[in-house]
């Protein structure tokens, strides 16, 4: 017989209380925590890396934090929306196990199924056994919806949003560099009135790569 360490008891009670009947919520929260820890690790790696110049760190750290914010917000918004939709489908009776549908039909509640003001858990008068069965079904639906939302967020939405933000950020940076080069080249030394001062554009082709 194995004994659980007493110092884990408060943690176990907390998990059981908040996530015992809502596995989908646990997946969402653990996913957010994972994103936060991943972002913190990347930022710390940049900060402690002596090979990265200080000026470059001043750009990379805010960039990593901004990317982390996009990742976390999009992940939470999409997964929570998917979970809420699935939970609502079960609550209103649009998505139910066959056994629960039979109970509702036997109670003359068929016309209530699927309506927004109908709550199967509260309005159907289910027995303790049927309620437990329905809660287990809802938990499984929440897990599936959360998993689908996670895949959609991590593999489709988040990369597209992050790339769009990064592209706009890069355009802004290139524009600033070009303006700085233009302003710097406007200064002409005596005797060089007809000589154009080289800028960054003189060393790049249309694709933006360096000419060799």
Image (tube, grey):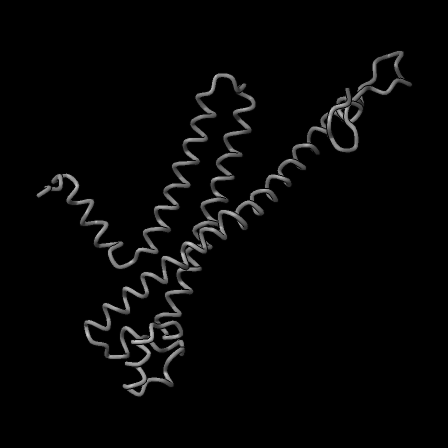
Q: Residue furthest right?
A: 194
Residue 46: image location, x then y, percent: 47, 25
On the rendered image, what quadrant is the C terminus found in? top right
Q: Picture quarter containing residue 6? A: top left
Measured along the vertical axis of the image, is residue 42 above or below residue 185? below
Q: Residue furthest bottom?
A: 108
Side of 138 relative to 195 (left or right):
left
- Residue nearest the viewer, comparing 161 with 147: 147
Q: Residue at x 86, y 20 (%)?
A: 196
Residue 87: image location, x then y, percent: 37, 65
Q: Residue at x 28, y 69 (%)?
A: 134
Measured along the vertical axis of the image, is residue 132 above or below residue 80? below
Q: Picture quarter containing residue 72? A: top left
Residue 97: image location, x then y, percent: 33, 72
Residue 55: image location, x then y, percent: 56, 22
Side of 129 relative to 77 (left or right):
left
Measured along the vertical axis of the image, is residue 56 above or below residue 99? above
Side of 71 relative to 205 (left or right):
left
State how many labels appear.
0
Q: Residue furthest left?
A: 1
On the rendered image, what quadrant is the N terminus found in? top left
Measured along the vertical axis of the image, is residue 80 above or below residue 203? below
Q: Residue at x 31, y 66 (%)?
A: 137
Q: Picture quarter containing residue 205? A: top right
């Amino acid at each position: 017989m194995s004994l659980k360490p007493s110092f884990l008891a408060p943690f176990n009670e907390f998990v059981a209380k908040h996530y015992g009947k809502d596995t989908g919520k646990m997946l969402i929260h653990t996913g957010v925590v994972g994103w936060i820890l991943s972002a913190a690790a990347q930022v710390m790696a940049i900060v402690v890396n002596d090979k990265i110049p200080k000026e470059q760190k001043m750009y990379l750290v805010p960039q990593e934090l901004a990317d982390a914010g996009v990742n976390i917000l999009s992940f939470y918004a999409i997964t929570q929306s998917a979970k809420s939709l699935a939970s609502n489908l079960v609550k209103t009776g649009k998505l139910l196990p066959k056994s629960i549908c039979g109970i509702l039909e036997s109670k003359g509640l068929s016309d209530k199924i699927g309506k927004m003001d109908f709550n199967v858990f509260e309005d159907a008068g289910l027995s303790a056994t049927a309620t437990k069965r329905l809660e287990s079904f809802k938990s499984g639906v929440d897990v599936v919806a959360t998993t689908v939302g996670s895949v959609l967020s991590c593999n489709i939405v988040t990369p597209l949003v992050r790339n769009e933000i990064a592209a706009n950020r890069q355009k802004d940076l290139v524009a600033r560099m070009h303006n700085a080069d233009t302003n710097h080249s406007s200064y002409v030394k005596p005797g060089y009135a007809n000589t154009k001062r080289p800028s960054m554009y003189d060393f790049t082709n249309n694709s933006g790569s360096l000419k060799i």
